Image (spheres, rainbow, N blue to C red):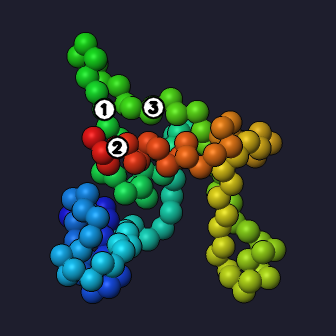
Amino acid sequence: MSKYLLQCLSCGAKITDNYTLDCSCGKGGFFRTVYQQKSFNPSSENTLWRFQEWLPVEKPASVGSLGNEKQIFEGYPGKTVVYKSVYLGKELGLKNLFIAFNGYWPEKNAKIVTGTFKGLEAPPTIRRAI
C-alpha cells in the first residue's frame, strides 16, 4: 500500500494515486490526500525533499547520466521554515497551529530566495508529469 491514498470528497471512495484528476463516481469531486503516517517529521535534508513523506509523489525523479544517478531538483535552492504558532493559535483556540514561511529570513534559516511559492510547487508537479 502507498504512503497515501486519494479520497473523493463527493463519494468518499479511496483510491491509489495513478495521477488521475477525477473520481470514477462522476460527481466531479475534488480529492483529499489521506496519509498513513499521522505525525509530521521532516527529514534533516536541506531541500524541498525533506517533506517527501508528505508530498503527493512516490519518490523524486532520477535520471541516469553516464551510469550515475542524479536526483532531479537535488540542489533546489530553497528552504521553508515551519514553526508552531503560540499566540495566533491561542487567539484562534488552536493548540497545534503550525505556520509555513516561504521566503527569505536568514535568521530563521528560511532561504527561498525567489520569494515565490512557484518554486516549491514546481518540483512535485514536474515529478507527477514525468
Q: Quadrant of the C terminus?
A: top left
Report crowding for label 2: few under 14, some 14 to 19, many 20 or more residues within 10 A (C-alpha).
Answer: some
- Circles 3 and 1 in contact, beta carbons < 8 Å: no
Report crowding for label 3: few under 14, some 14 to 19, many 20 or more residues within 10 A (C-alpha).
Answer: some
Give the labeled residue for mark 3: 74
Residue found 68% across the figure and 54% down from its top: 101
For the residues labelled 2 and 1, the Cα–Cα distance comes to 10 Å
Residue found 32% across the figure and 48% down from its top: 128
In this rendering, the label closer to the viewer, 2 or 3:
2
| Mark 2 residue type | Arg
Residue 78 drawn at (x, y percent): 60, 38
Give the labeled residue for mark 2: 127
| Mark 1 residue type | Ser
Circle on res. 17: none
Circle on res. 62: 1
Left or right: where 114 falls relative to 124: right
Residue found 28% across the figure and 27% down from its top: 63
As helix, strand or loop, the secondary structure at mark 1 comes to strand
For the residues labelled 2 and 3, the Cα–Cα distance comes to 13 Å
Report crowding for label 1: few under 14, some 14 to 19, many 20 or more residues within 10 A (C-alpha).
Answer: some
Marks 3 and 1, the one that precedes in the sequence: 1
As helix, strand or loop, the secondary structure at mark 3 comes to loop
Residue found 77% across the figure and 81% down from its top: 90
- Circles 2 and 3 in contact, beta carbons < 8 Å: no
Residue 43 drawn at (x, y percent): 50, 48
- Circles 2 and 1 in contact, beta carbons < 8 Å: no
| Mark 3 residue type | Glu
State which quadrant residue 59 falls in: top left
Left or right: where 60 falls relative to 122: left
* Vertical relation: 67 (above or below) 45: above
